[in-house]
Amino acid sequence: MIDLRLDDLEGIGPVTMRKLNEAGIDSVLQLAVAIPDELMDEIGGNRESTSELITSARKTLQENNLVEQEFVPASEALEWRKSILRCTTGSENLDALLGGGVETQALTEFYGEFGTGKTQIAHTLCATAQLAPEEGGLGGGAIYIDTESTFRPERLAQIAEAKGYDKQSVLENVVFTRVFNSAHLELIIQSLAKYIEQNNVKLVIVDSVISLHRAEFSGRGTLADRQQRLNRLLHRLLRVAEIYNVAVMLTNQVISTPDTFFGDPTKPAGGNVLAHASTYRIYLRKSGRDRKAIMVDSPSHPYSETMFAISESGVTDQLSKESKKK
């Protein structure tokens, strides 16, 4: 990726440059993923001026062909889509459901009850993302943002070893951070661009995206504030995914709706905010010793389902004996 510094932008004076650097923004890419209101709080000025700075950064990226141009024919948009990479999950069945794997420039959400395989998929992707693109990977490292104390480096090492990868190399190319409250998570996401540039990251995992906000914002009186903050966080993640061409995988919790008399009473947490933000939404369920993945929402995939399993090597297609008998 072309290294564009703030000096490459026109109209930024030394005072604004200093304020941006103090806010931790020292590249055009980092400025392009900023949110106007937050940038206004950090560097002063008004919303109009900060919006102009962000717009200027995005136009510079367009001029350097780093992001898609505005108002282009669908034929050009199709060509741009060819720059998207897809990361294998380790399961051919699950990859087929996803149209080739977890893709870059998108938010892919896996939701389900405890033990349905969300975190196991996340650990497996941390290893497979480091493969070269021609081998089904993304050719880069991963950032694992853990909000529920679910990350286990020993499990990652086990998956890498079982797959025949260089265990030490896989571990060194995964950057892990433990998050303790919603404000901390929002701060991590806000500074995500810098970590991506520094560590050649191609995959970002948030496990789980909703747990801290659910715990801290209880009751209907706090719902509006919670959803607004969650919405801002998700839109920042989507901007990062698009501009840096990285894959973002989210795990999500579920809630039960007792008033559902027909169908599955299990629903994903986060409401419409998370539903609209996610590019792909996959529902995971247990099926004996195996797992079922259901494509619930996608801009291009049909509603479909498939089976996969969890083994020593992470996500796999191997089904249990019970499933094979059926």
Image (cartoon, helix red, strand yellow):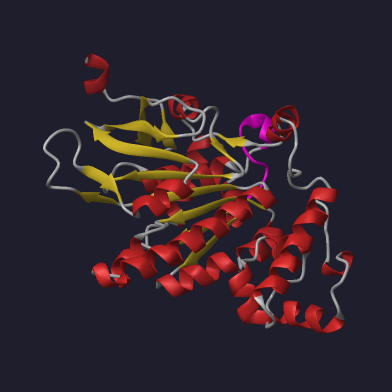
Q: Is residue 303 left or right of residue 288?
A: right
Q: Is residue 51 visible?
A: yes
Q: Is residue 259 left or right of residue 221?
A: left
User: Residue placed at 27% from the left, 72% from the top?
Assistant: 221
Q: Is residue 173 visible?
A: no
Q: In the image shown, does 179 or 17 lie closer to the viewer? A: 17
Is 122 drawn above or below residue 91 in the view shown? below
Image position, residue 310 (x, y; %): 36, 36
Residue reaching furthest to the top: 325
Image position, residue 312 (x, y; %): 39, 38
Q: Is residue 138 magenta?
A: yes
Q: Is residue 203 magenta?
A: no
Image position, residue 154 (x, y; %): 44, 54
Q: Quadrant of the C terminus?
A: top left
Is 252 drawn above or below residue 10 in the view shown? above
Q: Is residue 234 left or right of residue 294?
A: right
Q: In the image shown, does 143 or 226 lie closer to the viewer? A: 226
Count of numbered marks = 0
Quarter of the rendering containing residue 288: top left
User: Residue placed at 79% from the left, 55% from the top?
Assistant: 59
Q: In the image shown, does 254 or 172 lie closer to the viewer? A: 254
Image position, residue 126 (x, y; %): 53, 47
Is 19 drawn above or below residue 132 in the view shown? below
Quarter of the rendering containing residue 120: top left
Q: In the image shown, does 94 or 126 lie closer to the viewer? A: 94
Span colored in magenta = 132-141
Q: Main secondary structure of the magenta part?
A: loop
Is 64 drawn above or below residue 214 in the view shown? above
Residue reaching furthest to the front: 48
